[in-house]
Structures are given as structure tokens and as C-alpha cells.
Image (cartoon, rainbow, N blue to C red):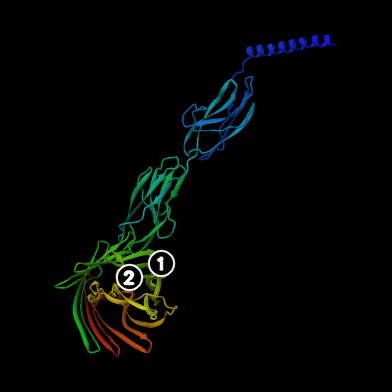
Amino acid sequence: MKSNRNYLFPSLWATILSGLFFFLSCEKENPAEFAAVTTLSVTEVSSNTAKSGGNITSSGGADIISRGLVWGENASPTFEQHDGLTADGFGHGLFISNLSNLLPGTTYYVRSYAINSAGTAYGNEVQFRTLSELATLTTTNVTDISVTSAISGGNITSEGGSSVTVRGVCWSTSQNPTTDDNHTTDGSGPGAFTSNISGLSANTTYYLRAYATNIAGTTYGSEVYFTTQEEITGHCLLSNLYMLWEDICEDKVWSGEDIINVYYDDNGRLSKWEWEHPEHEEYWLFTYNSQGKIEVVEDYWDGKVGYYHFTWEDNKVTRQWSYDHEPSESKTTIEFSSNGEISRVEYYYFHNNEWILRRYITYSWLNGNLVKAEEYSDDSWKKSTSTERDKISIKPRHSIKNLREKEVPVLKSTNNIVLKSTWLLTYDDKDNPFSIHQALVLLDPDFYLFLSKNNVITAKRISGDKERTEINQWEYNPQNYPGKLILEGGDEDCYWTETIEFIYKNCD
């Protein structure tokens, strides 16, 4: 037995060594080769994806350890230099690859690859181009609004993979305008551009969008809207007001004579409202935003300058006064109905880091005329003294020089806002030419002469059991514009009279 084991082991080792020598010698005689692989056609091409693949017809005598696609914007992409690649398993045969994160409107070169112990083999190169997308752009706010023209434009931030061939703005009196509506043509390519809009109608609201066209189609920026100025050429335009007034109250008499000069900008909007004084300089200066709405009114009197700031939001505007760069602790919010008539005015005071409603007025209209105004207020607050801006009016004695110490609320009461007074107004059948001066209306919504379609002939104020009535006697010029107003009114305590002469220019 012992001799048998000694015999068998040398024989087994000889067999193993002989086989190993044969295997190594075969490997040496038949080393691995590069695999053979072809690239499939590119299909299902979109703006940023595509589909292709490959077919490994020979593994090269060694295992395929990785396979997939490589691609790039330059020809002959490799596993080491590419813009993208996939890894789609291992082994020989057919495989499918999904290309992603491609750029729109871009030419790519793609090759399949297969890796074995011999190295990386590449298939034939296939070229394809991704689809273009619509351009991306924004619409520029409308500026320089006049009676028949305005300026806008846009900014093309992406051409979508193909050149923008046409760009501009389009507009209509209906929302979502397209290039089938009125439009401009303002060059081509990316970047910002300016559009000059013309041929508009006076006092009309337009909707506008920027547009850009490339091979993928036409796309639009966000929609903006604006209203053109009212046509005033050939019509009477208020130039001056001459005012004589007298107030008699508790046996005290105040009287005066005022002259107001009225100026306009090139778009027919109020630009300056100036009181003539031999010894003082006093005026309002008006500034408008790109939509033609009042934005700032500078209130000047002999070196003192205050500002009314107007902030617009949907159907309302907030007015706040500031003096010496410090905003007042009060603000006024004016709301409008869908047809542009004032519907509500709210007066707020700032206290304990919040705005508290102190007073409001509601307005009722009929056929374009204000017929009723109801004033609600809360007089039950505790009060202290603070410097505030006095009430404004077209009369100079109520202008910025009346900065004074007055009582203002400092503590909120228990929601005790009640009806305090009611205004009832009647009208004649003549058109009111002053309703175009929206800037004055927003400075003082209580000043009814500038609010309505027709001219007020009576204004009655009812406060508790107390009434006061103002009677307006109008005289008209040949163009049916008011030439003179004689105003009389009063109650048991006070009586006042006022005569206003209206001087015009540009009358037919």
C-alpha cells in the first residue's frame, strides 16, 4: 500500500503540470483581440433625448466586461473624451442605449463601445441632430405711453437650439395677443430688443406680449397691459383758475384771492399745479409710471418739500405722504370698481407695528356720477399730539405750509367705527372736463368737482341731526365748458362763498 501511494502522486503532479503548461502555451499562442461592435441607427430623437445602441458580433476571445455608447459634439468621441456615455451591461450581442441630457438643436456624433481584456473597441460613427425647442423670452414693461404710441420690447434669453429669425411685440384690445394681431418686427437673434408701437387709439387699454420665432415655432413672453392717454388736441384745456373766496364762521371772516396755473406734459397729463403768490412759491409736481398712472407728487412751499407716493396694485392704489424723507404715520388706500370709478377710500394710522383702519368712505355711482358718499369713522380712540400733514385741497391755505400739531389716534378702540355723515349730490347735464385729471382726484378724493361725468349743482352733507348744503351755479363758455362756478353753502354755524373762473387754451 505504501508503495502504491508513492507511485500515484508523482503521476498526478505530472499530469497537472503538463496541463498547466499546455494551457499557458495556448494562451500565449492565442491572445485576446479587440471585440467587433457596430453602432445602431439613432431613433426617437427629441430636443434632449434619443435612442441607439450596438451589436457586439465578436467578443475577441475574451469576456466583454462593459459596453455602451459614447457621444459628443465633436467627431470620434471616446471613452475618455466625450460629452456623454452609457454603460449597458456586459457580454456580446445586441444592446440598447438611451441618450439623455442633450442640448436642443445640436449635432452629435455617437459610437458604440465594447471593452474586454484587450482594450476598448468602437463601432462605426453615427451622426444625428436633436430637435429645436421654442425660444425663451420675457416682455419689457411699456413706457412712454402717449395718445397713439408707446415703447416696449423683450429679451430672448434662449434661442431654443435654433436661430430666432423674427422677434417683436404683438398687441390687442383682447388678452393673449398673437402675431395674427398688430405686431412689430424687430430683427432676429437672442438678447434684448426695443419695439416702437404706433397706430393706437386714445384712452384705450391694450394687452401686449413679446414674441420670438425659430424653426420650432413662435412663442410669447408674459402679458402686460397699458392704457393710452386721452386725446386732448382741439379741445379746451384748463390753463388757469381764478378763485375768490370768503368763509364766515362764528363771527370770524377769512377771505382771499388765489390764482392757479395748470401745466401739462407732452402726453396731455398734469405736470404742474402752481399757485401764484407775490411772496411765496408753491406748487405740485406730478410724476407718472410706465403705465401712465400717477406715481409721485412733489408738494413744495417756500423750500419745504413733501411727497405723495402712490403704489398701485390691481384695482387699488395706496397713497402715503412723507416729509424730510420720513413717511407719515398715516396712509390712504383708494379702491376702484371694474369700470374705474372710486368705490372705497380707507384711512389708516400706524400704531404698534400695524396699520389700523381709522376711517373710510364708500361711494355710490349712477350713470358715471357720484350720487352718494357715506363716511364712517371711529372717534373713540385715545389721542396724543403729533406733527402730521393737514388735509389737502386745491386751495393754497390747505397746502404743505399747514404742517401743524394735531391730535392723532394712538390706541385702537373696540371696533367702534360708525356712520358719521352722508353726502348726497345732484348734477346738471353738461360734461365735466376736469374728470380727466385723475392725479387731482387721487390727491383728494373728497374734492367732488373732479370726480364725475357731469357737474355738481347741489351737495348736501348730513351728519347726525345737522345738515349743510352747497349750491353750485355754473356758467358755460361757447364750447359748453365751465367758465365760472359760484359756490355757496353753510349751516347754522358757518357760511361760505367761492367764485372760480376757469381759463382754457386750445379751444376750438
Alpha-carbon neighbours of circle 2 within 10 Å: few (<14), some, or many (≥20)? many
Q: Position of residue 171 (x, y in %)?
A: 39, 56
Which residue is most to the bottom? 492
Q: Quadrant of residue 384?
A: bottom left
Which residue is under mark 1? Answer: 315
Query: Which residue occupies 48% across, 27% down?
Result: 75
Which residue is most to the front? 2
Alpha-carbon neighbours of circle 1 within 10 Å: few (<14), some, or many (≥20)? few
Q: Nearer the viewer, residue 44 or 332?
A: 332
Mark 1, secondary structure of its residue: loop
Q: Is the N terminus in the top left, top right, bottom left or bottom right quadrant?
A: top right
Q: Nearer the viewer, residue 341 or 173?
A: 341
Q: Quadrant of residue 363?
A: bottom left
Query: Which residue occupies 60% across, 18% down?
Result: 33
Q: Amino acid at mark 2?
A: Leu
Q: Amino acid at mark 1?
A: Asn
Instruction: Please indicate whether residue 395 sits to the left or right of residue 376 in the image.
Output: left
Which residue is under mark 2? Answer: 442
Q: Position of residue 145 (x, y in %)?
A: 31, 59
78 lies above or below 424: above
Which residue is most to the left? 278
Q: Quadrant of residue 480?
A: bottom left
111 lies above or below 432: above
Which residue is most to the right? 1
Q: Which mark is residue 340?
A: none
